[in-house]
Amino acid sequence: MAAEGKLRLGVNIDHVATVRNARGGACPDPLRAAKLAEEAGADGITAHLREDRRHISDADIDGLIGVLTVPLNFEMAATGEMQRIALRHRPHAVCLVPEKREERTTEGGLDVAREENRLAHYIVPLRAAGCRVSIFLAADRHQIEAAHRIGAEVIELHTGAYCDAHAVGDGATRDRELSALREMAAYGHSLGLEVHAGHGLSYDTVQPVAALPELRELNIGHFLIGEAIFRGLGPAIAEMRRLMDEARG
């Protein structure tokens, strides 16, 4: 577990399962990846059980609950089926995310303001079961206020637009998105929310985000799994950890 005040690193293992499912069978094993991530210094493991089961499976969640010694952040759509699964397993954290069948990855944040009444009722049993409820959302004041009103304990700011702008060399948009992340991290913290961030972060983009003092956790997956092909999962995570610590230092 991360020391108090230290920026935590959650490692998303979804795309280990993506590679496994592309061929079928049992390899590579997401549970093995989770244990390696623990050993390399991950403070938590993130896994998104999608409605179409395109990567993580129900059996993977069963296995993770059984073997992890660090917290599991269970990403899911706000559906009845996923609520039942979460209540059965009672993971440390439940992160509600938007989900569309046609998307390759999660696009944008959850529109909490539009579904405020439904989501307020939806999270009640999750909180009663002891799960920390997190909402994955855009760096938008109205969405953050809605998340606060419904009783979420955590918000995770979507860093995808910032990372995408960096990737295409659009410095003006990158700086504008980083400014929004900075402002909304401070605003969420001022409301008493714990603030996390993630989506698309890489070695090249992580440090300006990691330097935001209100952030308590970054969740990073696709880049680390891809980098692991070249340098191994442990070293890939260790380098991300080093860059995060350097940004905070």
Image (cartoon, grey):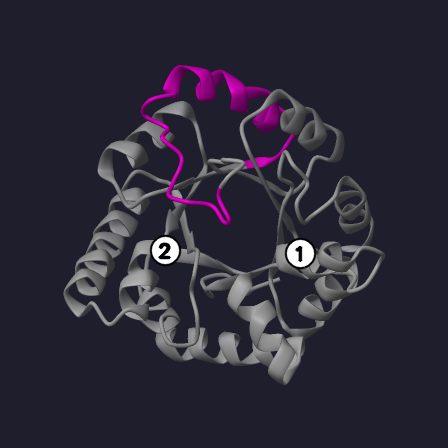
Q: Nearer the viewer, residue 229 or 144?
A: 229
Q: Is residue 109 visible?
A: yes
* Residue 78 image offset from top left, x and y in percent: 54, 27
Q: Specify the farthest residue to the right.
A: 25
Q: Nearer the viewer, residue 66 or 78?
A: 78
Residue 182 magenta = no
Q: Given the image, on which type of amino acid does mark 1 rest? A: Thr
Left or right position of 166 against 98: left
* Residue 106 image offset from top left, x and y in percent: 47, 45
Q: Which residue is mark 1?
A: 18
| Mark number displayed over residue 182 | none
Q: Nearer the viewer, residue 241 or 108?
A: 108
Residue 131 magenta = yes
Highlighted range, magenta = 103-132
Q: Residue at x 71, y 62 (%)?
A: 34
Q: Residues within 10 Å of mark 1 (few under 14, many from 20)?
A: some
Left or right position of 152 against 72: left
Q: Residue at x 61, y 66 (%)?
A: 42
Q: Given the image, on which type of amino acid does mark 2 rest? A: Gly
Count of marks, rendered view: 2
Q: Nearer the viewer, residue 209 or 21?
A: 21
Sequence-first tag of 2 and 1: 1
* Residue 63 image offset from top left, x and y in percent: 81, 49
Q: Quadrant of residue 48?
A: top right
